[in-house]
C-alpha cells in the first residue's frame, strides 16, 4: 500500500533524528506515526539531548511556534527557513528579521 492508502497490516512510521553537526553523531531519535507532525516531535528530540544546544538547523517543516518555544526553552538559536506563506510573529522572535531579509537577500533553494 502507498503511504496515504489504507492498509490492513502495515502502518507507516517516521523516525526523526537529531544529529550533532560537528561530530556527525545521532544524539536523539524518536519514532512517531504519521499522525504526529514534525513540530510536535521537535520538542521531544530536544529533551533527549544531553548538554548545551547552541544552534538548531532544521527544515521548513519545523517553522512552527512549538519548535520556536522548544528552542527558547533550551536557550538555543533556531535556524529554519520560513514557509512561503509565513507571517511575522512577535518582534522579539527572530522570524520577523528573517522575513524582512528575504526581499533583499532572497531564498536559497
Image: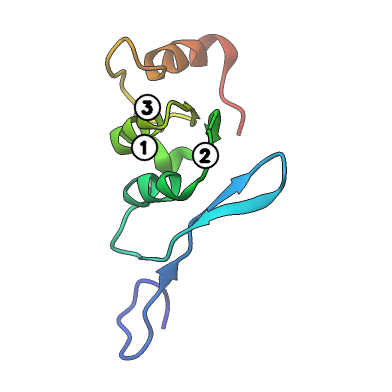
Q: Residue at x 37, y 52 (%)?
A: 41
Determine the CA span between mark 1 and mark 2: 10 Å
**Is 10 located above or below residue 51 in the figure?**
below
**Is 102 located above or below residue 28 in the figure?**
above
| Quarter of the figure with the C terminus | top right
Q: Position of residue 17 (x, y in %)?
A: 53, 55
| Mark toward the viewer: 2 or 3 | 3
Rendering quarter of residue 22? top right
| Contact? badges 1 and 2 (CB < 8 Å) | yes
Residue hosting label 2: 58
Number of numbered markers: 3
Task: Identify the mark at residue 67; answer none if there is no mark.
Answer: 1
Mark 1 surroundings within 10 Å by alpha-carbon count, few (fewer than 14), some (14 through 19), many (20 or more) = many
Q: Residue at x 61, y 28 (%)?
A: 108
| Side of 85 relative to 103 (left or right) | left
The colour style of the image is: rainbow
Earlier residue among tags 2 and 3? 2
| Quarter of the figure with the N terminus | bottom left
Q: Position of residue 45 (x, y in %)?
A: 44, 50
Helix, strand or loop at label 3? It is helix
Residue hosting label 3: 72
**Is 108 located above or below residue 104 in the figure?**
below
Helix, strand or loop at label 1? It is helix
Determine the CA span between mark 2 and mark 3: 15 Å
From this viewpoint, which residue is outermost toward the right? 23
Q: Residue at x 71, y 48 (%)?
A: 24
Mark 3 surroundings within 10 Å by alpha-carbon count, few (fewer than 14), some (14 through 19), many (20 or more) = few
Mark 2 surroundings within 10 Å by alpha-carbon count, few (fewer than 14), some (14 through 19), many (20 or more) = some
Q: Position of residue 91 (x, y in %)?
A: 31, 10
Amino acid at each position: 500500500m502507498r503511504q496515504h492508502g489504507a492498509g490492513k497490516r502495515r502502518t507507516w512510521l517516521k523516525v526523526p533524528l537529531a544529529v550533532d553537526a560537528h561530530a556527525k553523531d545521532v544524539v536523539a531519535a524518536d519514532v512517531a506515526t504519521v499522525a504526529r507532525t514534525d513540530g510536535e516531535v521537535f520538542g521531544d528530540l530536544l529533551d533527549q539531548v544531553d548538554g548545551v544546544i547552541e544552534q538548531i538547523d532544521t527544515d521548513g517543516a519545523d517553522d512552527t511556534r512549538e519548535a520556536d518555544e522548544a528552542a527558547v526553552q533550551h536557550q538555543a538559536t533556531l535556524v529554519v527557513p520560513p514557509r512561503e506563506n509565513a507571517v511575522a510573529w512577535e518582534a522579539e522572535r527572530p522570524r520577523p528579521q528573517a522575513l524582512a531579509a528575504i526581499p533583499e537577500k532572497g531564498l536559497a533553494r
